[in-house]
Amino acid sequence: MLPAQARLRRRPEFTVVVRSGRRAGRPTMVVHYLPERPVVRGGGPGDPPTGPRAGFVVGKTVGNSVCRHRVTRQLRHLVRDELHRLPTTADLVVRARPDAAGADVAVLRRDLARGLDRVLDRS
């Protein structure tokens, strides 16, 4: 499981990464990567989070709720092992595609690694 400070939670955070970040499509997922998170002004409690953060989008096209939650857990586990590759100011959103429902963990791991390789190479 990802620690709380390593997770994206609010819709605007997801929106910024998806719209402004780099994207790499794979058969089971799309990886969105933003190397520098924007500075949030006003109203936020405490200091901005340190370290890379990740969020997951698993829509109804992937399957029923049991299937979506299983895919989310698998992706969360895989991303946790890959966070060390990201700079401390980076945000990552992994959007699952319908093929992720039938994919095993090895396929998801391969697609995540290749997607990260693509977005990190353009740095």
Image: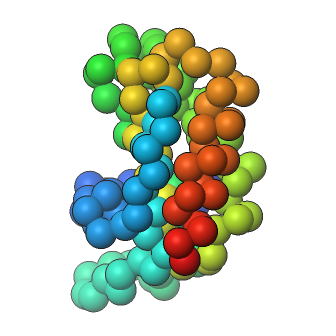
Residue at position x 48%, y 31% in the image: 27
Residue 119: x and y, percent? Answer: 52, 62
> Which image quarter holds the N terminus?
top right
> Which image quarter holds the C terminus?
bottom right
Residue 43: x and y, percent? Answer: 26, 82
Q: Is residue 61 above or below residue 3?
A: above
Q: Quadrant of residue 38?
A: bottom left
The answer to whether 96 appears left or right of 7 in the picture is left
Residue 66: x and y, percent? Answer: 46, 13
Residue at position x 68%, y 37% in the image: 110
Residue 122: x and y, percent? Answer: 53, 72
Q: Is residue 104 above or below residue 107?
A: above
The answer to whether 19 appears left or right of 67 in the picture is left
Q: Is residue 65 above or below residue 113?
A: above
Residue at position x 74%, y 49% in the image: 81
Res. 8 in view? no
51 or 82, nearer to the observer? 82
